[in-house]
Image (cartoon, rainbow, N blue to C red):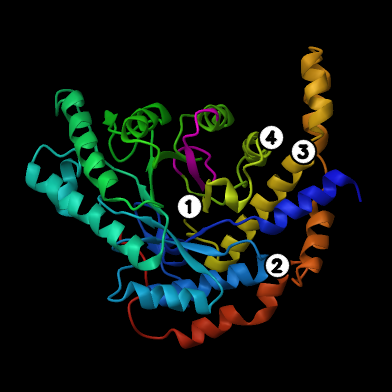
Amino acid sequence: MSDRTAQAKQVLAAQNIELPSWAFGNSGTRFKVFAQQGVPRDPFEKLADAAQVNQYTGAARSVALHIPWDKVDDYGALAAHAAGLGVQIGTINSNTFQDDDYMLGSVCHPDPAVRRKATEHLLECVDIMDATGSRDLKLWFADGTNYPGQDSIADRQDRLAEVLTEVYARLGDHQRLLLEYKLFEPSFYTMDVPDWGTAYAHCLKLGPKAQVVIDTGHHAPGTNIEFIVAILLREGKLGGFDFNSRFYADDDLMVGSADPFQLFRIMHELALRGVVGPDSGIAYMLDQCHNIEPKIAGQIRSVMNVQEATAKALLVDTDALAAAQAAGDVLGANAVLMDAYNTDVRPLLVELRAEQGLDADPMAAYAASGYAEKIKADRQGGQAAGWGA
């Protein structure tokens, strides 16, 4: 085994890919939510399903919550339940986009009363972070406008900054605010946080506990996402990822399914700077909707896709790459990168799983476990988790 392969296995053994609780509930398009059997009915059952993904991959040790979708009376009990399943509560995601009051925006709404309501929700999310031991508060705002003249673009930015400043001041010493951006949808003339530059500008003013989170589906077609990754890394402002795949818009498909080479290029930039592991300060999370595929299996496959892209990135011969770049050897440098991308890393990951006491094939092992059949039988009655359309 080469030194590079041994080092790659060491990094991969520590890698953590956070799971989204909402991926285990019913979801669909904006036209229809497709119900599946055995879907969780509460956050406790969501955590049980997430623990299955970690059990078979060994690389999904935390679960993000979405409030109020995952609201409970006792968050300490929920955190204890997670620990008992071998996982922990991760990022707390806010929701300021589903109430009728938010039709014209939430934190950017022209009505101060609506902005206050949204702000109180964000502060409640920090309270939940305190109760669960969570580090990160993730903010994505559906705020924007559909028509020219509908509202003042500049005033909306002022309102956003005012709310972010109040929430930032509420954070504890070891807590962070992660600001997400989205090019379009649900607003089609302006989104109030449409791109990484807008998010970066707000985070820069807020301070060191505010960082940018990249959703890989939130860009215009052809956007060079790895360039954004490199810039934010250079500035110390990359806080995390929402991994998914897209063909047309914010499709929220399984990460690595539409463009696995893009995922590799992103992971290459991260591996170059040694920030793939859990101590990097970067939160690696899935953000996907499994509308037609089984929920748990879809998450297992997604984790495996990230592992494979990471393994390839870690196998890049960085010495040869640097030498080719310094020499202006365009084709040589590209060949070094492509050699790593074209490497079949599945045997390496099979070896790693064996060393971790895991099954060589997580998908097959989960399918053979009988868990899917068990939850279909056990979860009769009650209201399945999900969202309406």
Residue 187 x, y percent position in the rendering: 27, 36
Distance from Cα at disc 1 to Cα at disc 4: 24 Å
Which disc number belongs to residue 341?
3
Distance from Cα at disc 4 to Cα at disc 3: 15 Å
In the rendered structure, which segment of residues is drawn in magenta? 234-250
Query: For mark 3, does the 10 Å Cα neighbourhood hold few (<14), some (14 to 19), or many (20 or more) residues?
Result: many
- Tell me which amino acid carries mark 4: Leu
Which disc number belongs to residue 214?
none
- Tell me which amino acid carries mark 2: Pro
For disc 1, the marked residue is 287
Left or right of residue 2: residue 222: left
For disc 2, the marked residue is 362
Label 3 vs 2, first from the N-terminus: 3
**Residue lying at 79% horizontally and 61% vertically, measured from the top left:** 352
For discs 4 and 2, the disc positioned in front in the rendered view: 4
User: In which quadrant will I find the C terminus?
Assistant: bottom left
**Residue lying at 69% horizontally and 35% vertically, measured from the top left:** 272
Q: Is residue 376 magenta?
A: no
Q: On the image, which quarter does residue 76 sit in? A: bottom left
For disc 4, the marked residue is 272
Q: Is residue 241 magenta?
A: yes
- Please say if 123 is above or below 353: above
Distance from Cα at disc 1 to Cα at disc 2: 20 Å
For discs 1 and 4, the disc positioned in front in the rendered view: 4
Distance from Cα at disc 3 to Cα at disc 1: 24 Å
Q: In the image shown, does 337 or 369 lie closer to the viewer?
A: 337
Residue 177 showing in the rendered view: yes
Residue 1 x, y percent position in the rendering: 92, 51
Q: In the image shown, does 164 or 368 lie closer to the viewer?
A: 164
Q: Residue furthest front?
A: 173
**Residue lying at 63% horizontally and 61% vertically, measured from the top left:** 59
Label 4 vs 2, first from the N-terminus: 4
